[in-house]
Amino acid sequence: MDKRGWMMMRVFINRYNPKAGDALLKFLPKEEMQVVLQQDIRSTDLTPILHQPEKLVKQMHHSWIKPLLKKFPDELLPVVGASLTPEQAVGLQIPLSPASIAPLVKTFIINNLYHQLEVHDLLPLDYLPETEFSILAKWTKSQLMLLIDFLGLYDLATEVRRIVNRDYLKNIYTCLTPKQFYYLKICLQQKERFTTPKLGIDPTKKNCEQLKQLLHRRGLFRLGRGLHHQHPDLIWYLAHKLDTGRGKILMNEFQASVTPTAESVLKGQILNLMNFLKPELNAL
């Protein structure tokens, strides 16, 4: 039985015989009993497992799907495109099938993509432990990108504290949105709790594009390390809502070592921004 099957067994026990609980597992071989015990699921709802392939593929950024298309013949690609979301199909530049796609065909395509991903051990989102960061899994790519951009302002604040030349500061400030500039001032009022490498900006020049890229990279650094002790499956979902480049960086930062002090500070920064950005997030 694969991991998905063991998850279903755990949910069946929760649903139909919760009082007996793990006592039922004594009838299984020891190895299999251990596998079921490892399924830390309290839900009694089987729906998340049954709809996992469709929900998972639907939420992914198209760049993760692109390599999987090699398994399909060219003449079948329009059918694949029609089985995906419109945004995914446009991103993959797949011409849509002129005919409507039967639900059974769509299910076959989605299941094929899901199996290629080899994520049978991945818990459905509904089964993940509830934390203050669980809501991030429901955010869109645009919302996550906004959070990441603002997290990088903490690094910019460190740089700005060392600059006294007004013209140099102007080169930086004019690259920020009014909301970013406002939050940068908040960051400047906070005491630095740990050091990070310099951003590498040249304040003598106005290079907004470079500044944006540097801030975004540092935002990924802070998000990944701030979520260091979250469930790894949550990070998988977040990474796959982003494009492959950003997603892989996020997963690498999540796996990197981080001191308890730094992690605590980063968690606080993420939570503060999640609250600060609520009006903008609702508009995206």
Image (cartoon, grey):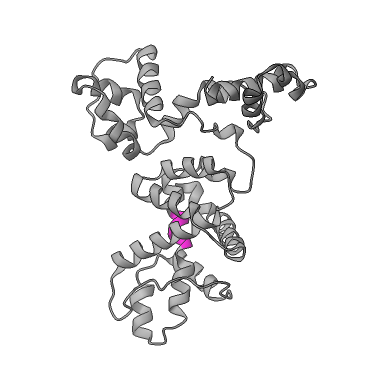
Looking at the image, which residue sits at the far left?
74
Q: Quadrant of residue 15?
A: top right
When the figure is inspected, residue 152 is found, relative to residue 235, above or below; the finding is below
When the figure is inspected, residue 106 is found, relative to residue 272, above or below; the finding is above
Residue 139 position in % (x across, y down): 49, 43
277 relative to 85 in the view: left or right: right
* Span shown in magenta: 146-151
Q: Nearer the viewer, residue 15 or 82?
A: 15
54 relative to 43 in the view: left or right: left
When the figure is inspected, residue 226 is found, relative to residue 85, above or below; the finding is below
Residue 179 position in % (x across, y down): 46, 64
Q: Magenta stretch: residue 143 in it?
A: no
When the figure is inspected, residue 284 is found, relative to residue 34, above or below; the finding is below
Q: Nearer the viewer, residue 141 or 174?
A: 141
Q: Residue at x 39, y 67 (%)?
A: 176
Residue 254 position in % (x across, y down): 49, 52
Residue 105 position in % (x across, y down): 35, 14
Q: Residue at x 64, y 32 (%)?
A: 38
Total tally of numbered discs in the picture:
0
118 relative to 277 in the view: left or right: left
Q: Quadrant of the N terminus?
A: top right
Q: Residue at x 41, y 48 (%)?
A: 142
Q: Quadrant of residue 57?
A: top left
Looking at the magenta stretch, what is its main secondary structure? helix
Q: Nearer the viewer, residue 2 or 62?
A: 2
Q: Magenta stretch: residue 148 in it?
A: yes
Looking at the image, which residue sits at the far front?
30
